[in-house]
Amino acid sequence: MLAVERIDVFIQSSHILRQVSLQVAPREVVCLVGRNGAGKTTTLRAIMGYLRPNAGRIVFEDEEIQGRRTHEIALRGLGFAPEDSGIFSDLTVAENIEIATWTRRGGRPAAERIEHAYEVFPVLRRYRGRKGPEMSGGERKMLSVARALALDPKMLLLDEPFEGLSPAIIPTVSDGLAEITKRGHSILLAESNIHHVPAFTTRLYVIERGEIIFAGSPDAVRADAATMRIIGGAS
């Protein structure tokens, strides 16, 4: 479904990503783990077209998408929820979700897509009339994912969906992501805390200083003491 093939990304004169490669298959949950500044967000932003790779290819659904505009990539079926949530604070929960159906008008009817988002995160129904400043960090994270889901994407890119959340809200967000996968969507999520990697993750990549240093199952990375020390999962 998605193949990132040996991409390099420079930001001004800094070489941020070095020959990064990863894959996500249909209905798969893949986690990109790394410390802050390791290159996780840059990888997601390159996939979504916010950054143009200087080398390599990004292929989605058998079509090269590197160099395309962000809205064109979204229209092909990639939804993105950024680390800062990126919701429109002046709009209500309902309006934030609905606006995604205006962005990508094809696919299922708008009402069905909106309902789909509420089914994944039922708590948002109670807050339909709330605006961004009235919501907690966890609610904003859920709204960001729900809005991306209302695009009717084939795959979601989620940047630090658990970052800054209280331990009490993490299971709710995780359950929502599990429900998304059950409904047939693939997920690529970036995470800095190995302990927040969802149990239903099928494959895991570790990135350090812009390079992929490990690829394998979550169990395999947890058994690799050297890699765990790098990402802060062990002393």
Image (cartoon, rainbow, N blue to C red):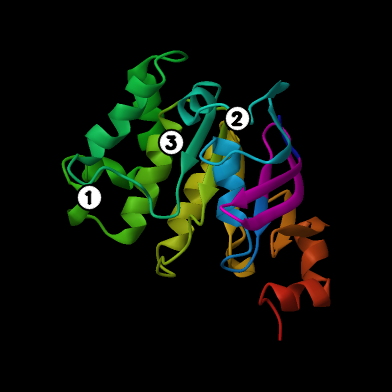
Write down the residue under mark 2: 67
In the rendered image of this protein, does residue 109 appear above or below residue 89?
A: above
In the rendered image of this protein, does residue 42 appear above or below residue 115?
A: below
**Magenta extent:** 6-30
SS assignment at label 2: loop
SS assignment at label 1: helix
Q: Earlier in the sequence, mark 2 or mark 3?
A: 2
Which image quadrant is residue 149 in? top left
Task: Point out residue 14 in the picture as x, y percentages from the top left corner.
Answer: 62, 58
Q: Could you tell me how far apart the alpha carbons at marks 2 and 1 are, in whole angstroms? A: 32 Å
Residue 123 seen in the figure? yes
* Image point (53%, 38%), residue name: 180
* Image point (58%, 60%), residue name: 191
Task: Point out residue 75 in the picture as x, y percentages from the top left corner.
Answer: 49, 21
On-image quarter of the C terminus = bottom right
Question: Which one is nearer the viewer's eye here, 154 or 210?
Answer: 210
Q: For the residue marked with disc 3, what is the amino acid?
A: Ala
SS assignment at label 3: helix
Disc 2 or disc 1, which is closer to the eye?
2
Q: Main secondary structure of the magenta part?
A: strand
Write down the residue under mark 1: 132
The crowd level at tag 2 (other Cα within 10 Å; few <14, some 14-19, many 20+) is some
Judged left or right of residue 77, residue 23 is right
Task: Point out residue 183 in the picture as x, y percentages from the top left corner.
Answer: 56, 31
Residue 20 painted magenta: yes
Q: For the residue marked with disc 1, what is the amino acid?
A: Gly
Judged left or right of residue 33, residue 69 is left
Q: Could you tell me how far apart the alpha carbons at marks 2 and 3 are, in whole angstroms? A: 21 Å
Write down the residue under mark 3: 148
